[in-house]
Image (cartoon, grey):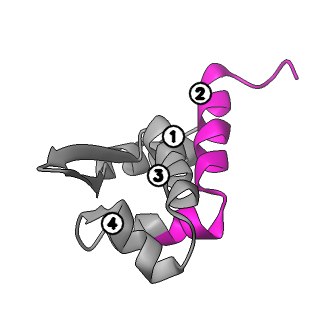
Amino acid sequence: MKYVREQEMRSALALKAIAHPTRCWIIKELTKKEHCVGEFVRAVGVEFATMSRHLAKLKQAGFVSSRKNGREIRYFLNRKAIEDLFTSLLNS
């Protein structure tokens, strides 16, 4: 596809990262406060590894960041990345 520019390719990859109901839910929950994997696992009822993969996909896309808090890793939303995605879609 010749017309597609680099920005559209990045946007498509970012949208693919959030194109799953659980990942959309994670983003919604992270708008309220930061969480650890265990909190998400208990809320959703999936395996720890499954939730970790969802978070890794969102982190790779830049939507989620993390910080270590003792033995646990806390995840929080990178609002700027989400704003940038929708700005690029609306201003293309």
Specify the quadrant that holds the N terminus.
top right
Magenta stretch, main secondary structure class: helix
- Comparing 42 with 13, the one in front is 42
* In contact (CB < 8 Å): disc 1 and disc 2: yes
In the picture, measured across the screen, residue 14 lies left or right of residue 61, that is: right
* Residue 56: x %, y % from top left: 48, 44
**Image mark for residue 55:** 3
Q: Closer to us: mark 3 or mark 2?
A: 3
Quarter occupied by residue 20? bottom right
Instruction: Give how far apart the Cα atoms at labels 1 and 4 are.
Output: 22 Å
Instruction: Give how far apart the Cα atoms at labels 1 and 2 are.
Output: 8 Å
Instruction: Give how far apart the Cα atoms at labels 3 and 2 are.
Output: 23 Å
Q: Which residue is mark 1?
A: 88
Range of residues picked out in magenta = 1-25
Instruction: Give how far apart the Cα atoms at labels 4 and 3 are.
Output: 11 Å
Q: Residue flagged by tag 4: what amino acid is it? A: Leu
Q: Secondary structure at mark 2?
A: helix
In the picture, measured across the screen, residue 89 lies left or right of residue 9, that is: left
Q: Which residue is mark 2?
A: 7
Nearest to N terminus: mark 1 or mark 2: 2
Q: Is residue 65 above or below residue 54?
A: above
Q: Residue flagged by tag 1: what amino acid is it? A: Ser
